[in-house]
Amino acid sequence: MNDVYFQKLEEIQKNEFIKAAIDCVGAGVVITDPEQEDNPMIYCNRGFEELTGYHSEEILGRNCRFLQGEETSSKVVSKIKAGLEDYHPVFVEIRNYRKDGTPFWNELQIFPVFIENMDQTYFVGVQRDVTKRREQEDLMGHYLNEVKRLSTPIVPVEDDISILPLIGTVDDDRIHDMLETVSHHVKETKEDYMIMDMSAIHSYNEAIHMGIYQLYQLLKLMGTQLIITGVKPSLAMQSTPYANFSDLQLKTYTTVKQALKAIR
Ligand SMILES: Cc1cc2nc3c(=O)[nH]c(=O)nc-3n(C[C@H](O)[C@H](O)[C@H](O)COP(=O)(O)O)c2cc1C
C-alpha cells in the first residue's frame, strides 16, 4: 500500500466525517451547482429529507423549486432569483410543500461558496421549518386587531348619537386607532353627535389632549359635533399645561346623562 492510497483513504474518511456532521445539523442543508443547466441539487443532508419527506435519490439533479406550490409567493421567488443571479446571499421565508402535499413555512438561507481547489462557486442552502412561529405570529396579529377593536367601543344610543367611552392607557398609537375607527363609524352612520366619555380616565396626557383636538376637527369636517363628558376636576387640573381649546366650540358636561338631556 502506497502513500496515494492512504491519502485517498484519509480524504474519503474526512468527507464521511463531514457528511455525518452535516446530517446531525437540525436543519436541511443542500448544495447546488450553478454551472450545470438549471442549477440542480447535487447534495442534500438527512435533515432535508426529514423536512421535505423526499429521499435524496428522488430529488438529486433537480432544481429546488419543486418544493414550491399554489401558495408560494412569486414575489419571494423573484427575490431569490435576483439574489442568485448576482451571487448574493439570500434570506427569505417561503411557503413550501412536502412530498405528501402538506404546506410549511421554510426559513431559507442561501450562500454562494467558492471552492478554491475546484475553482468554482456552489450554492449552499439551509432550510428550517418555522411554521409554528409563523402561526403564532398570525394569531398574535389577530388578537392585537381584536384588542384594537375592543379598545374603541362605540355605543350607539340613539339614531343620531353615539358614545365613545375612553378607557385604559391612552397613547399616540391608541389615538391614531381611535381616529380611524371613529371616522369609519361616522362615515357609515352620519350621526349628529359623538359623546366622548372620559369618566374612566384617571390621568391626562398630551396624547389625550391632541386626540380631543384632532377628533373635534375630524368630526366637524364630517358634520358631527363632539361632546366631552366625565371630566373630573383632577383631570381638568392636569390639562392646564397644554394649549387651551378656547377657539373650539367644544361642549363639556359632567355626565353622559346631562349631555343627552342637553341634546334633547
Ligand atoms: C442552494 C439553494 C437552495 C434552495 N432551496 C430552496 C427551497 O428550499 N425552497 C424553495 O422554494 N426554493 C429554493 N431554492 C430556490 C429555487 O431553486 C430557485 O432558485 C427559485 O425558485 C428562483 O428561480 P426560478 O424563478 O427559476 O424558479 C433554492 C436555491 C438554491 C440555489
Image (cartoon, rainbow, N blue to C red):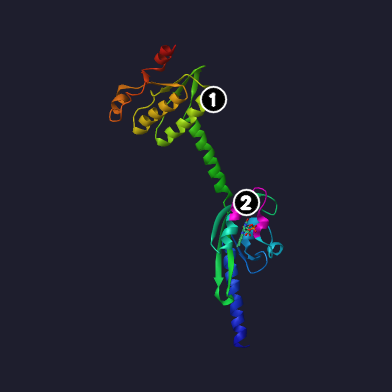
Which residue, given by chain and number where applicable, does mark 2 sit on?
A: 74
Residue 240 rendering spot, x and y as whole percentages: 28, 27
The image's mark for residue 180 is none
**What amino acid type should be assigned to the residue bearing mark 2?**
Ser
Q: Quadrant of the N terminus?
A: bottom right
| Relative to 106, 237 lies left or right | left
* Picture residue at 52% right of the left edge, 37% below the top: 143
Marks 2/1: CA–CA distance: 37 Å
Res. 214 in view: yes
The image's mark for residue 188 is 1
| Relative to 196, 243 lies left or right | left
Q: Quadrant of residue 87?
A: bottom right
Out of 226 and 149, give the one closest to the viewer. Answer: 226
| Residue located farthest toward the right when viewing the structure as drawn | 58
* Residue 211 to residue 47: above or below: above
Res. 105 in view: no
* Picture residue at 41% right of the left edge, 15% below the top: 259
Q: Quadrant of ligand 1?
A: bottom right
Q: Quadrant of residue 225?
A: top left
Q: Quadrant of residue 197?
A: top left
Out of 53 and 168, give the one closest to the viewer. Answer: 168
Which comes before the other along the chain, label 2 or label 1?
A: 2
**What amino acid type should be assigned to the residue bearing mark 1?**
Glu
- Magenta region, residue range: 64-78
* Picture residue at 55% right of the left edge, 70% below the top: 114
Name the element at disc 2. Answer: helix
Residue 58 rendering spot, x and y as whole percentages: 71, 62
Is the CB of mark 1 within 8 Å of ligand 1? no
